[in-house]
Amino acid sequence: MAELDQARPRSGWRRPLGERSLREVHGSIAIPPDAGFWRKLFAFAGPGYLVAVGYMDPGNWATDLAGGARYGYTLLSVILISNLMAILLQALALRLGIASGRDLAQACRDHYSRPATIGLWILCEIAIAACDLAEVIGAAIALNLLFGLPLIWGVCLTALDVLIVLFLQHRGFRYVEALVVGLIVMIAGCFAIELWLSKPVVADVTVGFIPTAGILGNPDMLYIAIGILGATVMPHNLYLHSSIVQTRMYADTHASKAEAIRFASIDSAVALMFALFINAAILVMAAAAFHGSGNQDVADIGDAYKLLTPLLGTSAASVLFAVALLFSGQNATLTGTLAGQIVMEGFVNIRLRPWLRRLITRLMAIIPAIIVVALYGERGTGALLIASQVVLSLQLPFAVFPLVSFTSDRAKMGEFVAPGWMRALAWSVAVMIAALNAWLLYQILV
């Protein structure tokens, strides 16, 4: 009997794989078995764009606007590095989901003690609430700029987007992905026009992508840089991606999983390059329009909207800016719903109806947003947006370290353990993120 036990393959996971996350859409999208490369790539395309949405939400706008207006093109290097980090970490997240059948939250529940799991869940919920806060504020500001709707009413109105989520999930997951991709294309189109109108100096933009040590020595610049990092590499996106890649109907074989990882990685990298373009475009536009025109202190989205028309010479600049902001806020709400459902089911195995989960998440964001708007009005929203992104960045190590640890463990991942070069880069990124957060806290406290 002992010999039989030794011969039986062992798993690095402590518990058998239980109920799948997002079970209502798990394995719901068929993959044509004999199709060519492009047709298969199209079948796998989608999850990467849902993840990319979180990298271009209104929180990114606040940090990118502040960075471009105050420091010109200098922080473009931070956007580039953050995006490369995101591509690496999302590749690990999808690898975990496909290879193990577990999302990151389920993997944490399996590996860690009950108290540690609860602690990680609470931290993740805080991160989701911070992200949702940025979406609420961003959408409310856009509604105010376009239609004159008071901010408080705009904040309350954002709770109704739960109906959009419910409708699309009922129709099928491909409808969710199609809407997200469509909105991303429209946001990118808006900013392509904004770049053409702002006429940045190409040589200065190119230099901005080169990292400089001066960022670490300037506490104010470092604060914005950490905010950009938090707005770009978002902790709940790691949980989200590890789950939604499992919506594809690939076989439980080594060859099929290897193919799924390959195509999902391409989908993720291409989608995140869209996020890189949009984030860089926001900062470049802010640098070109505000930094050299005596408007270096513009960090507020409302002020940026009002100044774009006189500075760029056309009202279309302001209108496109606000429309893209509205699309961005609405897009991000879709993925926030899914992420909230995944972490609650994965960490503590609590399964709520999507509309109830959405309302809970929204209330956690709406209450502080209403308080800030009531006390400080529009002026308080910019600082709140940036602060929410710093909170996200501070939560990031608690998602990154478990992810890197799991995907580096051969007992857990088997043949799909991350290759050596990927593990080395991932651990370096994890340590860098933790070090930057520690440095930020030191600068704030001292």
Image: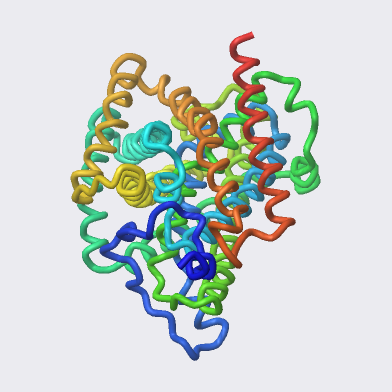
Residue 283 spot, x, y in % from top left: 62, 39
x then y, percent, for residue 54: 46, 47
Asked if residue 201 lies left or right of residue 243, the reply is right
Quadrant location, the N terminus = bottom left
Identify whether 128 is placed above or below 334.
above
Residue appearing at x 28%, y 47% in the figure? 349
Q: Quadrant of residue 268?
A: bottom right
Q: Is residue 360 left or right of residue 378?
A: left
Residue at x 56% of width, y 26% of height: 298
Choose between 193 and 110: the one closer to the eye: 110
Q: Is residue 311 left or right of residue 439?
A: left
Res 62 visible: yes
Query: Quick check: 292 above or below 2?
Result: above
The image quarter containing residue 364 is top left
Task: Point out residue 290 in the picture as x, y percentages from the top left corner.
Answer: 62, 31
Q: Is residue 424 above or below residue 144?
A: below
Residue 149 appears in the picture as rendered:
no
Q: Nearer the viewer, residue 362 or 274?
A: 362
Nearer the observer, 409 or 202: 409
Residue at 53%, 65% (x, y): give it. Answer: 6
The x and y percentages for residue 23 are 28, 62
- Residue 340 lies in what quarter of the image? top left
Q: Residue furthest top?
A: 446
Picture mark count: 0
Query: Farthest residue toward the bottom?
Result: 34
Q: Residue at x 47, y 32 (%)?
A: 301
